[in-house]
Amino acid sequence: MSFTRPLPRFVITKQVKGRTRYYWTLPTVYRKLGCALHKEHETALGNDYEVACGADGQGGRAATLNGLFDDWDRMRLGEPPKPKTELRAGTVDWLFATYKTSNDWKKRVSARTAPDYEITMDLVADVVGKSGIRIGDRMITSITPIVADKLYDKILTTPVRKGKSERPRTAQKAVVLCRRAWRVVHRLHPGLFSQGPQAADEAPVWNPWEGVAMRRRQYATKPAATREQVYAFAWGAIAAGQVQPAAAAVICFEWLQRPENVLAGYVTWTGYRSKDHPNQIRIEHHKTGEMVLHPLEETIEGERVLFYEEAEQVLAQLPKLGTGLVMKPGRTEKHVAQAWDVHTMARHVRKLRELLGLPDTFTLDACRHGGMTELEEAELTDGQGRALSGHKSKAYEGYAKRTEKRALAATRKRYAHRVTAEADAESSSSVTVPEISRQGC
């Protein structure tokens, strides 16, 4: 039976075991000129016409390879590559774009980390191989384990900062991100990850990033702000007329909320001393899905004990702009308050810490780590610490009432630790420091 459907440029057919198979063949003249696309990409296109050539002979895997050849040929002739108006299915660029539209990206990548992930994807995609072709333009099937190892080494040994010979953290991030993206997109489009004929007992090598040997690096300890620094910042920011950064720092430190969630407005007025929970603040950890009701006070032998008295003094300075405690004011009275952009708030924090003489390590993230450090210093049990921080553990799933009791016990212990530390500091000081009134700050 004669073949009547059109074949793309450089595509030939062969009969293999009674079936028509399609192959992309680079002419010898271009091989001699140095084109290595036939070595870097899978040229066996399979036996499905539409997958190999598209519905009309103008698409499929052949179109991707021909597009890569055209880019190479233009570079050979000194012309710029043709601007890309659409992504070719099966390329690394397409894989990253598909990953960013997946449910995994939407549900597991926060707004805070998404820009950093995108920078890493662009870094990988813009690496240029010996053939002069961007990694992003190459087919995903051409990224073998050997190629993945070479990409890791190239990113590792190509520093961008002066005086640095390597960038192990960036290279590690690239491997971890690529491994995840390959896994997610393979689940959605398994047919595009086929790497040609393999032995019956040979497992398909669809994720080349599994098992990449990475340089061991010493992890730096994350900075942790102290209680004194947090409240020096808070009252200083309020005195400077910036209540929002002050409240954000205190919430991150005392109630261990992640900065991106505070700034997104997830700590709400309805969750702070609400009608249902008048003596608690509700902190919902969106990363883990955990919700913690932190006790704010307790009555012991007829005496009211405020666990977070100074923190609540800071929150009392906040105007109600919207549903969230920490919201960005609108430009005019008619404009509705908005959630803070993480980077905008970071700029405010940097300016304030410089004004107040605080160390460069002082950030909202450092405030949260400072609160976590205080839990450690208070010698809480693992269960008590998890009850306050919202970290997941199977032992605590589904025990809301038990978690609430643990939170109260943990808060008592943390409060007692703080009171003891303050008493020790006061007794050891030979100089009496008058209490500074914060009225009107």
Image (cartoon, grey):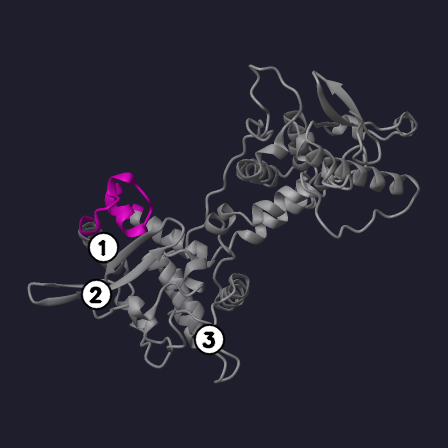
Separation (CA) of disc 1 from disc 3 = 33 Å
Instruction: Tell me where the magenta segment starts and ends, as one range.
Output: 376-402
Asked whether residue 87 appears in the rendered view, the answer is yes
Q: Is residue 150 left or right of residue 344?
A: right
Give the structural element (helix, strand or loop) at label 3.
loop
**Residues at discs 1 and 3 in contact (Cβ within 8 Å):** no
Q: Is residue 338 above or below residue 123?
A: below
In the image, which disc is placed on residue 277? 2
Closer-to-camera residue (403/8):
8
Query: Would residue 50 be counted in the magenta stretch?
Result: no
Q: Say if the magenta span includes residue 399.
A: yes
Who comes first in sequence, dot 1 or dot 3? 3
Q: Is residue 400 left or right of residue 316?
A: left
Q: Residue at x 70, y 41 (%)?
A: 136
Q: Quadrant of residue 255?
A: bottom left
| Mark 1 or 2: the one toward you | 2
Give the vertical position of 361 relative to 159 (above or below): below
Residue position marked by numbered label 3 in the rendering: 337
Residue type beneath disc 1? Thr
Residues tagged 3 and 2 counted as in contact (Cβ below 8 A): no
